[in-house]
Amino acid sequence: MINQAIFRAYDIRGIYPDEIDEKSAYQIGLAFAAYVKDSGTEQIITGCDARISSPVLSRSFIRGVTDAGINILNIGLAPVDMVYFASGSMHLPAAMITASHNPGEYNGFKLMRKDADLMGINSGLSDVKKLIEEKRPLKSKKGLVVEKSIKNDYIEHVLGFTEYDYIRPMRIAVDAGSGSVGPILGKILGKLSVNYTPLYFNPDGNFPYHEPDPKKEKNLSDLKNEVTTNHYHFGCAFDGDGDRIIFIDEEGKYISPSIIGALMAKYFLKKNPYSKIVYGADSSQIIPDTIDIYGGKAIREKVGHTNINKRLRTERGILGIETSGHYFFKNNFYADSGIISLMVIIDILSRQKKSLSLMVSEFSKYVSTPEINLKMDDSEELIKKIAQNFEGYEIDWLDGLTVRTDNFWLNLRLSNTEPVVRLNIEAKNELILERVKKDLFRLIKKFK
C-alpha cells in the first residue's frame, strides 16, 4: 500500500526510501499514465534532479508509465523549468522527479498536464491517488522510451527574456547549490556579456556544501562572503531543481522576494501596460502598491505554487509572485523559472545605471517580520478566537486570517506543507511592528 502522506498540497514528496521508494514510484507512473491516457495523450515527458535517489525513482516511474502502454520522452538531468518548457512547447504532460528545496534524503514528483499545467491535490493529484488504489490492468503492448536533449531549444527560450546582445558588462556570483541547474545555467550565462563566478555548479545529490534551500539565510553564507569580498554587482542562489531563486545586492544583503517581485512588476508593466499580476496572500504591500502605481491590476491569491500558477493562467496575467522566491511568467507557459528570473534582473540592471541596492531602495517602504512558524494544538479554532479580537478591523479569510489597517497587516494561516501555523506581520515602522507582534503573541499565549 502506498504511503498516503506523500501526497502533498502541491506535489508528491517524502523521505527515500522510508516514505517513497521504487515501488511507489512505479505505482505513481502507472496511475499518472492512466490519468493522461483518459485525455487521449500517448506520451509523457520526464526529467529529474541531481538527488542520489532520482535515477532509480525515475527508472521505476518510467517502467510504470510504459507498462501502462504510454510512451516516454526522457530529457534526463534538468532543472524543473526545463521540464515545464518541454511540456509547454510540445503540448505534452510531464513529470519531474525532484524534492525541490528539501534536504537530500527527500525525493518526489511534480506532475503536470500538457502546457505545464501544474497539478496539486485539488487539481489532479487526488485523481492520481485514486487511480493507484484502483490497480488497473497492465497493457500487453508496452510504451517506448526515447532519450532526447532539448537544451538548445531551452537556452533559446530563456535568452528570449532579455535583449542579450545589449547586456552591459557586469560581475555576478551564482550559487547553484549542487543542484540540477548548474550545467545548463553555465551555458546560458556563457552567451551573455557577464563575468560570473560559479559556486557549486557541479550536481551532487549529497548537497555537500549546504542544503538546497536558498530561502534559509544560513545557506547563503558562502555566496554573501564571495560577493562582499570580491565586489560583484549582485549575487543569487538557486534551490535543488532551479525554480526558486534568492538575490543579494552588491553589499551582500538579502533582498526580500516581495521587493524583487515589485521590481519585476514595474519592469513588466512599463512594457505591458494594464496587465494583470498575481501575488500570494503573504506578500508585502509593496507589490499591490507598485502594481497600482504603474497601471496594472493586482490580483491576490492563496499562497502556494499551484495556486499562483493556476490563477495566473486563468487571468492570463503577465507575472506571478510568490514570497518563497518563485516568479511565474506568462511567456513561460505561466510556469515559474529561477533562470528566467535571473535573466529579467540582468536585463533590468542593464537598462539603468544604478546599483541593485539603490534600485530596490525605491521599494523598501515597509518593515516586516521574517515568516514565523508556530506549533499549536487545534490551530483552526485558535485562529478563529484571535480573529474575534480584531472585530472592527478589515478582515478577510482568503488564506487563513488576514487583518489589515492603515498602519499594519498580518496573516495567520495553516501551512500546506508542514504541521505549523505561519505568521507574517508587516507595518509602516519598527515601533508599530513590535507592538503588533507583542500583542499577537500575548493573544496566542492566552488562547493556547
Image: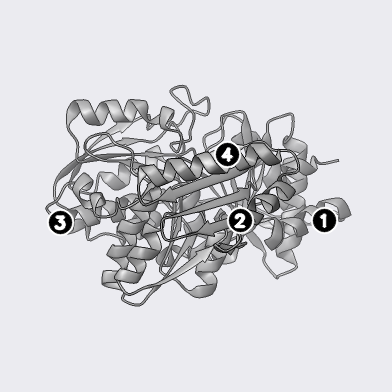
Residue bearing mark 3:
352
The kind of secondary structure element at disc 2 is strand
State the count of labels: 4
Q: How would you rate the neighbour count of disc 3 (Cα within 10 Å): few for under 14, some for 14-19, many for 20 or more?
A: few
The kind of residue on which mark 1 rests is Lys
The kind of secondary structure element at disc 1 is helix
> Which of the two marks, 1 or 3, is nearer to us in this view?
3
Residues under numbered marks 1 and 3 in contact, where contact means CB atoms less than 8 Å apart: no
Q: Residue at (39%, 52%) from the top-left corner?
A: 258
Mark-to-mark CA distance, 3 and 4: 43 Å
**Furthest residue to the left?**
353
Residues under numbered marks 2 and 4 in contact, where contact means CB atoms less than 8 Å apart: no
The kind of residue on which mark 2 rests is Leu
Residues under numbered marks 2 and 3 in contact, where contact means CB atoms less than 8 Å apart: no
Check the image and report above or below for 335 versus 101.
below
Residues under numbered marks 1 and 2 in contact, where contact means CB atoms less than 8 Å apart: no
Check the image and report above or below for 246 versus 304.
above
Q: Residue at (25%, 44%) from the top-left corner?
A: 190
> Which of the two marks, 2 or 3, is nearer to us in this view?
2
Q: Nearer the viewer, residue 70 or 170?
A: 170
Mark-to-mark CA distance, 4 and 1: 41 Å
Quarter of the image containing the C terminus? top right
Residue bearing mark 1:
130
Residue bearing mark 4:
441
**Furthest residue to the top?**
208
Residue 112: x, y in percent? Answer: 61, 58
Residue bearing mark 2:
401
The kind of secondary structure element at disc 3 is loop
> Which of the two marks, 2 or 4, is nearer to us in this view?
4
Q: How would you rate the neighbour count of disc 1 (Cα within 10 Å): few for under 14, some for 14-19, many for 20 or more?
A: few
Q: How would you rate the neighbour count of disc 4 (Cα within 10 Å): few for under 14, some for 14-19, many for 20 or more?
A: few
Q: Is residue 290 visible?
A: yes
